[in-house]
Amino acid sequence: MNGTINGSINLIGYGLSAIGGAIGVGLVFAAYINGVARQPEAQRVLQPIAFLGLALTEALAILGLVFAFVLK
C-alpha cells in the first residue's frame, strides 16, 4: 500500500463530464427555445448559434471520454 489508487477511477471523471455535457446541451437548447418563443423572426439567426453550442458542448464530452481512456 504505497498510497496509489488502483482501478478505473478515471471513468468516474468521464461520467461527470458526460453529465456536464448533458446539462450544457439542455441549457443551450432551452435558451434557443426561449429566444425563438420571444422573437420568432430571429429563428434563422439563433439556430446556427444553437447548433454550434451543441457541437462545442458535445466535443468537450467526447474529449473527456478520450482522456478517460488515455489516462487509464
Image: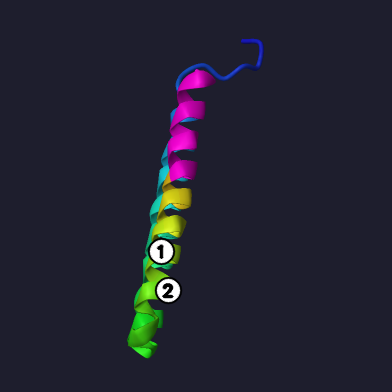
Residue at 35 percent of width and 77 percent of height: 43
Q: Return the residue at label 1.
A: 48
18 versus 49 height, above or below = above
Q: Return the residue nearer the eye: 15 or 40.
A: 40
Q: Return the residue nearer the eye: 68 or 52.
A: 52
Q: Which residues are magenta?
A: 59-72
Residue at 47 percent of width and 28 percent of height: 66
Which three-letter amino acid code belongs to the residue tagged 1? Pro
32 versus 48 height, above or below = below
Q: Is residue 14 magenta?
A: no
Residue 27 seen in render? yes
71 versus 13 height, above or below = above
62 versus 44 height, above or below = above
| Distance of label 2 from label 1 (alpha carbons) | 7 Å
Residue 51: image quadrant is bottom left
Tell me which secondary structure the magenta stretch mostly adopts. helix
Indicate the position of residue 63 as horizontal and vertical percent values. Answer: 49, 35
Of helix, strand and loop, which one carries label 2?
helix
Q: Return the residue at label 2.
A: 45
Contact check, label 2 and label 1, Cβ < 8 Å? yes
Q: Residues within 10 Å of mark 2 (few under 14, many from 20)?
A: few
Indicate the position of residue 53 as horizontal and vertical percent values. Answer: 46, 58
What is the residue that sits farthest to the right in this orientation? Answer: 2
Q: Is residue 70 magenta?
A: yes
Which three-letter amino acid code belongs to the residue tagged 2? Val
Of helix, strand and loop, which one carries label 1?
helix
What is the residue that sits farthest to the top in this orientation? Answer: 1
Residue 31 seen in render? no
Indicate the position of residue 11 as horizontal and vertical percent values. Answer: 44, 30
| The N terminus - image quarter | top right
